[in-house]
Amino acid sequence: MATEFTMPRLGMTMESGKVSEWRKSEGEGVEPGEIVLVVETDKVFFEVESPVGGLLHIDVPEGEEAPVGGLLAVIAADRTEYDRVKAGPPRAAAGPAEAAPAAPSAQVQPVGQAASGAAEGKVRIAPAARKLAEELGLDYRRVSGTGPGGRITREDVEKFAAGRAAGGAAAAAAPVPPEEDRVIVLQRNEHRRIVARKMLEAVREAAQTYHSNDVDATAVAELRNRLLAQVEKETGLRVTITDILMKLTAGAIREHPIMNSSCTDGADILYRNIHMGMAMSLREGELLVPVIRDIDRKTVAEIARIRTDYIDRGRQGKLLPDEIRGSTFTFSALGMFGLERFAAILNRPENAILAVGAILDRPWVHAGQVVVRKVMNTTLTYDHRTIYGAEAARFMATLRRQIEHPEDVLKIS
């Protein structure tokens, strides 16, 4: 009996997903629990396992979207059934109400590395195949693809490499150009394409404006040192400057709710709850913004616990779609790289993002005297269509006051 293979629900708010890569070719045999598909949703990629064994008939090709519960493929029990299914009328990806219930549910795993699944010019090649070709120094354009639509698979690259090693003429490598003539082309994977598109949309669609302050962060640094021993002893977690600053930023947003907003063509939307996105680059080529929900109602220790969990799972590619969507304000810190100041691009549809630089020893006027204090820069990027300059300035003044006197506003435990 044939089994329908449908688009899995990877998060509570997921409505559809994109077929990023078929790991198996049309008509190829699959085993129960074998990874056959990579699904893309927002900035997250998931590997999907086959619920049963059989022969794969693909209904939705790579690059196309399907709703949750929509038909993606049929797994036939044997060759006779496969021939019958393949000879039948073409199937469209059905909606949840139209899709027949699948047999055992497909198992889903986050992908360790974002897959591209996109054609490069006229050459269609699987991400794993491209990576292997690059590692072996092969020109994959010389490889004949046996996958759907002539797509080059990892197996095709392996056969090509084996043939070249044996001296086969058909597998001869392209001549290597002189060192001075080489050009390095960094192909964008699907994740980088999504980020690039969203960044460009943010610049085009928003009236981005900037406010910047140098702030005395001595009190924050001293508070962190005191909290470090206390929280680590109680919870085993290491509180960071970022944990404290995100909490303080949430407090300033609570006093200036216009910062917690979005701009649409017809109206400005102010959100009741503060869900702070935390910009991260945990793996090469990936920018993720996991969300700490209701951050203003969490303690510094709770924020540290969530941040640590996000970092650990983010490095493994195990963040869920619901954990990287729904932010209302974003916090971006690059001080750990020694960067003194920078301006971030809005994370649309949000109206504001705060960029925080490194804490450095600087001459500073304190209590009427020039002394050495720990100083950092904070730069706010905001959408002037909703947030006017005076409102942004008041927010920055509140944030500065809270950074300079953190214990006046923080719940510590």
Image: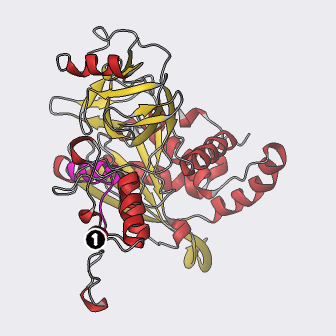
**30 with respect to 188 (left or right):** right
* Residue 367 drawn at (x, y percent): 61, 71
* Residue 352 drawn at (x, y percent): 35, 47
Q: Helix, strand or loop at disc 1?
A: loop
Give the residue drawn at x 49%, y 22%: 52
Q: Is residue 279 above or below residue 135?
A: above
Indicate whether residue 193 is drawn in magenta. yes
* Residue 303 drawn at (x, y percent): 62, 42
Is residue 292 in sight in this rendering? no
- Check disc 1 and report the residue beneath it: 185
Q: Quadrant of the C terminus?
A: top right
Indicate whether residue 152 is drawn in magenta. no
Give the residue drawn at x 40%, y 20%: 78
Query: Residue 391 or 190: which is nearer the viewer?
Result: 190
Name the quadrant containing residue 343: bottom left
Colour scheme employed for the rendering of this structure: secondary structure
The dominant secondary structure in magenta is helix
Give the residue drawn at x 36%, y 59%: 130
Q: Quadrant of the N terminus?
A: top left
Is residue 18 in sight in this rendering? yes
Query: Residue 16 or 292: which is nearer the viewer?
Result: 16
Instruction: Name the amino acid type tagged 1.
Output: Val
Q: Is residue 186 above or below residue 8?
A: below
The crowd level at tag 1 (other Cα within 10 Å; few <14, some 14-19, many 20+) is few
Name the quadrant containing residue 240: bottom right
Residue furthest right in the image: 233
What residue span does the magenta drawing correspond to?
Answer: 185-201
Q: Is residue 178 above or below residue 249?
A: below
